[in-house]
Image (cartoon, helix red, strand yellow):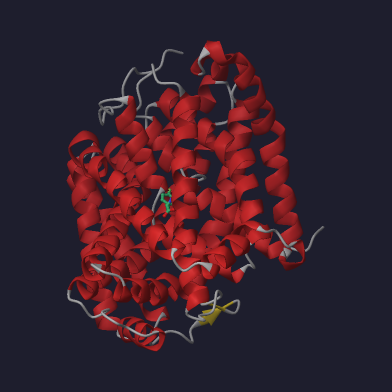
Amino acid sequence: MSRPAQSIHGQWSSRWAFILAATGSAVGLGNIWKFPYITGENGGGAFVLVYLICLAAIGLPIMMAEIMLGRRGRQNPVNTLHSLALDENRHPNWKYLGWIGVLAGFLILSYYSVIAGQALAYVFRAFSGVFEGVTPDGARSIYNALISDPERLLAWHTIFIIITMIVVARGVQGGLEKTVKFLMPALFAILLLLVGYSANTGVYFDQAVGFLFQADFSQLSSTAVLTAMGHAFFTLSLGMGAIMVYGSYLSKKTSILKVAIAISIADTGVALLAGLAIFPLVFANDLSVGAGPGLIFETLPIAFGHMTGGTFFGGMFFLLLVFAAWSSAISLIEPTVAWLVENRNVSRRRASVMVGFAAWSLGLLTVFSFNIGSTWTLFGKTMFDLLDYLTANIMLPLGGLFIAIFAGWIMSQNTSNEEFDIRYNFVYQIWRVLIRFVAPAAIMIVFLNATGLI
Ligand code: PFF
């Protein structure tokens, strides 16, 4: 069947625009806020190694699959999977895979926005100079003062959701593309500056390098392996159709392999740089590596508070973190917005407001789980922990598993081969082995192992 040449939402203006937008989606709180703290909680090197293996063996092939499916389907993930399944004479129920993604994006945005709101609050704290000369205890109490106040958290969460809705409402080129073009290079530069600062801590920097890169497998539990795999999906924005919907705005001429590699390298680079910036400070100030979600908010102000120009750089850092979170948040709701526009005849602007409002409401659970609702638990987890666990460790890998099965087994070899650049046929063969066998088997083994079934 012939496929539409373009999505009704338009197209990226160039290959670079796509790389930047997809990198903007991938690089976010996951790299700078989450990667360091889950690495700290899971013992360091061995966890990082498993994470890197998952990125290369599972993440990269699934990213290529998502781009390919999106570009071929040219619609939101629900319709894309529906129509590609029909093309192959398969059951239209594959569209429900798109629905899992839509739901996951909405659940993730609900808590993502609360953390991004905390980063936004820190922009103002940093620029106003409150970190100058701050002690580790002082940094901790500044953070506690923020999260223990539901009203303040709610206000920042609201602001972040509103700015997300505004960009999505403006569409592919006018909103998404424009925003990410100048953000990514600036973020990279400030991270390098911070690593430079941390490198001057001498022995503590060495200790941090050891912590991140020396694998001690006695530290690795089966749940840590699940967390590492889940984070590989989360950080690359995979398993929920975000990259798929971005792929639907991509030109036919672009090499899928090249863009997928570029995005993965940039994403991994930012995470490792964040680790190299943060852990030396943790060790130098005798803080706990397992501090959890507050880690960056409690450590980085100490560095900014003692470096020359720290007020400026601190403010810039949190500002860029907000930008990174922003360019990720827009990709979290783009699949749902695209679905509403295509299937329900709703205007883009209206669709953005509807989805944003729904995520905002659910976000209240996360706001309260830092304060008045910290004792509301289910399966021993706060609402925030539960949402995080459910989406990152279960929904995204499960979505990824079915995307791999779809691309490797449901879609015919002829069709997928057509989407890849023929000059790279051997790469195509490797991809096919990874997507048909390696990725599905690895995801299933990690799942069964973490649930104690094997
Ligand atoms: N990749 C983003 C991050 O690392 O912060 C989070 C994310 C964005 C996950 C978009 C999933 C997604 F679809």
Q: Is residue 76 visible?
A: no
Residue displayed at 75% across by 56% down? 448
Q: Is residue 398 visible?
A: yes
**Which one is nearer the viewer's eye here, 405 or 142?**
142
* Residue at 73% over, 42% down: 441
Left or right of 251, for residue 429:
right
Name the spot of residue 293 as percent of width and height, x first: 46, 72
Residue 401: x and y in percent read 62, 42
Q: Is residue 209 left or right of residue 448?
A: left
Q: Judge by depth and name the residue closer to the eye, 314 or 169.
A: 314
In x, y percent, where is residue 25? Answer: 37, 46
- Residue 195, given in percent of the width and then of the height, sits at 42, 58
Closer to us: 428 or 276: 276
In the image, taking residue 149 as reference, residue 163 lies left or right, namely left
Look at the picture and state if 191 lies above or below 424: below
- Which corner quadrant of the image does residue 315 belong to? bottom left
Q: Residue at x 51, y 43 (%)?
A: 96
Q: Quadrant of the C terminus?
A: bottom right
Q: Residue 365, relative to residue 206: is it above or below?
A: below
Who's the residue at 52% across and 24% down the image? 86
